[in-house]
Image: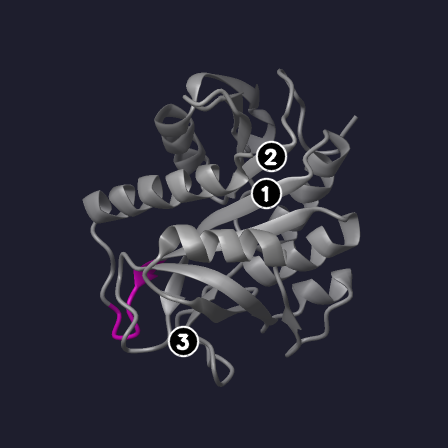
Amino acid sequence: MPSRLRPTNSYTAEAILVGDPGRALLLAQELLDQPKMCNHARGLWGYSGRTPAGHPLTIQSTGMGGPSAALVLGDLAELGVRRAVRVGTCVAVEEATEPGDLLVVGAAVAAGGSATAHGVAAGEAVAPDEALTRRLEAELGDGGVATIASFDAHPDGQVAPPGVSAADMQTAPLLARAAALGIEVGALLIVAESSAGRHIESEELERAEKRAGLLASTVLSP
């Protein structure tokens, strides 16, 4: 039995991972026919079902920050998840990156210490699964892959390493944990705040969440 999740329904081999349980509900309603809740323990809402094309898919919230996401991924591995795409938010570092933009993560720099528990030293970069990343890039079609930095605290006020486009709180530890577990994981991030501090509006965020979720679902389908 997993340590944190308490399954009330079966999980699937492919999953979309989101930090926010509200986003998990939104994407379950958007992407799945007759979604069924498969976890509500600890507020980590998860849903399983089939896409309109008939492909089994799980959408699971992982909580806030890298440590929580890494722990949940360990439980998901026990429940049979083998491929996943993180759909999350980030803060822009580059001025050209605007709220609502989608970024395919090509590398995540461990800018905080939580990734060290999974074998990645602070300042080192972790790569996502190559095949998933290529498919995400092809499906997105309006930009290349980005290097991001993952902090243990909110990126506001943090100094990002050179060469990164955006910052978040989860991707690097999640990718490091995925590598240790042998799970294929890619990441697609929504820019929620510009480098100048402009925040995305709620309606625009919901549109971006739905777009990112559909891209992730398409990439995870056979």
Residue visible at 67% across and 43% down? 73
Q: Nearer the viewer, residue 138 or 190?
A: 138
Q: Is mark 3 on a helix, strand or loop?
A: loop
Q: Mark 3 points at which residue?
A: 157
Q: Residue drawn 61% across and 50% down?
A: 185
Three-letter residue code for mark 1:
Ala
Identified by mark 3, the residue type is: Gly
In front of the other: label 3 or label 1? 1
Mark 3 against mark 2, which lies toward the viewer?
A: 2
Q: Can you tell which quarter of the image residue 188 is in? A: bottom left
Residue highlighted by disc 2: 14
Q: From the viewer's perspective, is 56 left or right of 71? A: left
Circles 3 and 2: CB atoms closer than 8 Å: no
* Dot 3 or dot 2, earlier in sequence: 2
Tell me how far mark 3 sits from mark 2, CA to CA: 35 Å
Quick one: which residue is furthest to the bottom in this view? 162
Is 147 a magenta residue? Answer: no
Q: Give the range drawn in magenta.
A: 191-197
- Marks 1 and 2 sit apart, C-alpha to C-alpha, by 6 Å
Label placed on residue 84:
1
Query: Secondary structure under badge 1?
Result: strand
Of the 4 image quadrants, the one containing the N terminus is: top right
Above or below, 147 relative to 183: below
